[in-house]
Image (spheres, rainbow, N blue to C red):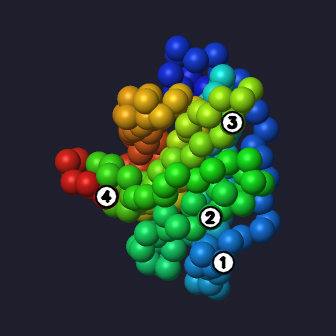
Amino acid sequence: MLHISDLPPTVPWTATKLDSPNPATPSSCTRLDYNSPSIVDTAQAGSQFKGPGMLVVNQVGLVADPGMIDVIWKHIYAQSISRCIGDAFSAGGAGHIKLLSSKRLPFPRLTRHLSAYRVLFQLTVKGMHVRGAFDMVVLGNERTLSMLMVMGIIGSASDEATGERDMTLIDLDLAEKIAGRAFSTASPAGTTA
C-alpha cells in the first residue's frame, strides 16, 4: 500500500479518507462484478491522497491462495476494460466531464499480471476548458491484487502530450514502489503489458 512519503515531493499531499465506490455499475462493466465461491478474500487495505489538481488512490486485496489471482485475472482483467473505465468515469462526472478517450496504456510488466488504462477528459473550470487524465494500473502476483488510480489535471489541449508523459512517469514510479513492496517475485522487466 502506498504511503504519503511515496508520492512526488513537489506536491503538497494530504492523506484523505478512502472514498466509497459508486454502487452504480455501467453495463459495460458487468464482468467487474465477478464473484465466485472459489475466491476467498482474506484482507483489504487502501490509501488515498489529494494534492492540488491530483488524486492518488491505492487499493490492495489479499486472497487465500495464489491460484485465485489467476482466476480473478482471467475473468476480469485478461480482456481490455478501457470501455468500462471510460463509462464509469463519465457516469461519476455527472455530466460535468467530457470523455475524450479511454484506452489501454502501454506499461512495463512489473508483476506476473499487469494491466494499465488511461481516460482523457475535459472539464470547464472558471470558464476555461482544461484536460485531465485518469489512469488505472492493476497489478497482480502471488496472493496480492493492487489497484493504483491516479487522476490529475494536465492543462490545456496544447499541454496534453507533456501532461500525459508526466502522468505516465508518476504512474510508473508509484507502480514500481507498489510492486517492490507487495510482491516478492516479479516477471522480468522490459516486457510490456
Determine the image quadrant of residue 131: top right
- The numbered mark at residue 193 is 4
Amino acid type assigned to the residue bearing label 2 in the image: Asp
Is the Cβ of the residue at disc 3 closer than 8 Å to that at disc 4?
Answer: no
Badge 4 crowding class, 10 Å Cα cut-off, few under 14, some 14 to 19, many 20 or more, is some
Report which residue position mark 3 lands on.
124
Labelled pair 1, 2 in contact (Cβ < 8 Å): yes
Which mark identifies residue 27? 1
The residue at the point 71 percent across, 70 percent down is 25
Q: Amino acid at mark 4?
A: Ala
Q: Nearer the viewer, residue 155 or 46?
A: 155
Q: CA distance from mark 1 to mark 2?
A: 9 Å
Q: Which residue is mark 2?
A: 87
Measure how far apart labels 4 and 2 are at the Cα level. Answer: 22 Å
Q: Nearer the viewer, mark 4 or mark 2?
A: 2
**In the displayed structure, does residue 101 sit left or right of residue 48?**
left
Dot 3 amino acid type:
Thr
